[in-house]
Image (spheres, helix red, strand yellow):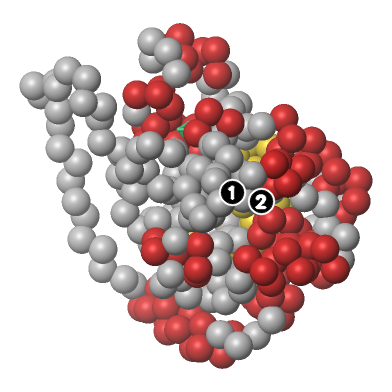
């Protein structure tokens, strides 16, 4: 069961909110075996290249493998590798309705240049319906709820029936990501999570993009090193952290996909 984000400070508390029952998470023998396999593979793959890690994921999980991308530089490197290894791996984007037009254009370019059609997975409600139902844009008053409704819920539908997902995170992007294994169990989404780029630096990513003529979001040349939804992303200044432009001015640093506790 996914944890709901905190209610906004302005909400009126319901006097009779039923409490969720916490079911003890006792791993079955099968799951214990999987965890032990993942531990072993994680050790083996720690010094492998991203291509080798992706190949292993494809061989091990077949059609059960999926890749979630926001078309960031790291995601484009994964898409480049997939275009050379196996274009049939399912790839999807969480299309919140608030993405930059440049991001959606990059999805088209990815189809043309890399031959991969990334599925756009959308929330049930359009932006207009969602804002009307919430008295305006929730990203201004409760971005965690907005991310939960327009990303996490959609992700849960998108991964239904899947057993493993590739993520494009790097360990040096943020403290939340510093402990990411190459392969491990993602207890939040109940999937095996494969991080082929965990060991790479920002420099490695841009070298791969430029050396291989991989398409990328033109906003990166305009001061946006990390790009999410338009209302929650600003360009950064020299010396700022590369994710400083995400949810700037709030304590929020992750949308909940790659953090352990949100
Ligand atoms: S990043 Fe901003 S606009 Fe996008 S889902 Fe989260 S809060 Fe909403």
Q: Is residue 68 above or below residue 219?
A: below
Quarter of the figure with residue 213: bottom right
Q: Residue furthest left?
A: 15
Q: Is residue 141 above or below residue 150?
A: above
Q: Position of residue 159 (x, y in %)?
A: 56, 50
Q: How many marks?
A: 2
**Residue positioned 49% across, 80% down in the render:** 38
**Residue at which label 2 appears:** 72
Quarter of the figure with residue 97: top right
Q: Residue furthest right?
A: 112
Which residue occupies the foreground of this view, 194 or 245?
245
**Residue positioned 21% across, 55% down in the render:** 23
Q: Would you call the spot at circle 2 few (<14 residues within 10 Å), some (14-19), or many (20 or more)?
A: many
Mark 2 or 1, nearer chain start = 2
Mark yes or no: residue 226 visible: yes
**Residue at which label 1 appears:** 226
Quarter of the figure with residue 165: bottom right
Please name which of the two marks, 2 or 1, marks the residue nearer to the observer. 1
Q: Position of residue 27 (x, y in %)?
A: 31, 71
Q: Are the residues flagged by discs 2 and 1 in contact, CB closer than 8 Å?
A: yes
Which secondary structure, mark 1?
loop
Spatial distance from mark 2 to mark 1, Cα to Cα? 7 Å
Which secondary structure, mark 2?
loop
Q: Is residue 122 left or right of residue 178?
A: right
Q: Position of residue 167 (x, y in %)?
A: 58, 60
Q: Indicate which disc residue 57 carries.
A: none
**Residue positioned 36% across, 58% down in the render:** 260
């Amino acid at each position: 069961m996914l944890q709901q984000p905190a209610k906004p400070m302005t909400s009126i508390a319901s006097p009779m909110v039923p409490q969720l029952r916490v079911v003890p998470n006792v791993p079955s023998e099968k799951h214990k075996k999987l965890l032990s396999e993942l531990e072993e593979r994680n050790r083996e793959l720690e010094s492998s290249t991203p291509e080798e890690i992706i190949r292993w994921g494809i061989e091990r999980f077949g059609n059960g493998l999926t890749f979630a991308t926001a078309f960031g530089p790291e995601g484009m490197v994964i898409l480049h590798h997939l275009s050379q290894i196996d274009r049939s791996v399912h790839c999807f984007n969480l299309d919140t309705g608030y993405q930059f037009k440049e991001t959606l254009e990059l999805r088209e370019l990815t189809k043309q240049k890399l031959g991969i059609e990334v599925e756009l997975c959308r929330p049930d409600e359009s932006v207009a319906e969602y804002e009307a139902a919430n008295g305006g844009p929730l990203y201004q008053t409760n971005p965690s709820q907005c991310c939960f409704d327009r990303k996490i819920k959609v992700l849960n539908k998108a991964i239904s029936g899947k057993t493993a997902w590739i993520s494009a995170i790097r360990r040096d992007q943020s403290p939340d990501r510093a402990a990411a294994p190459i392969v491990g169990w993602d207890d939040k989404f109940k999937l095996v999570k494969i991080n082929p780029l965990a060991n790479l630096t920002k420099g490695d990513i841009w070298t791969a993009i430029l050396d291989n003529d991989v398409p990328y979001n033109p906003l990166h040349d305009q001061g946006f090193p990390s790009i999410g939804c338009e209302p929650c992303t600003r360009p950064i200044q020299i010396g700022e952290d590369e994710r400083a432009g995400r949810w700037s001015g709030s304590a929020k640093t992750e949308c909940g996909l790659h953090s352990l506790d949100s």
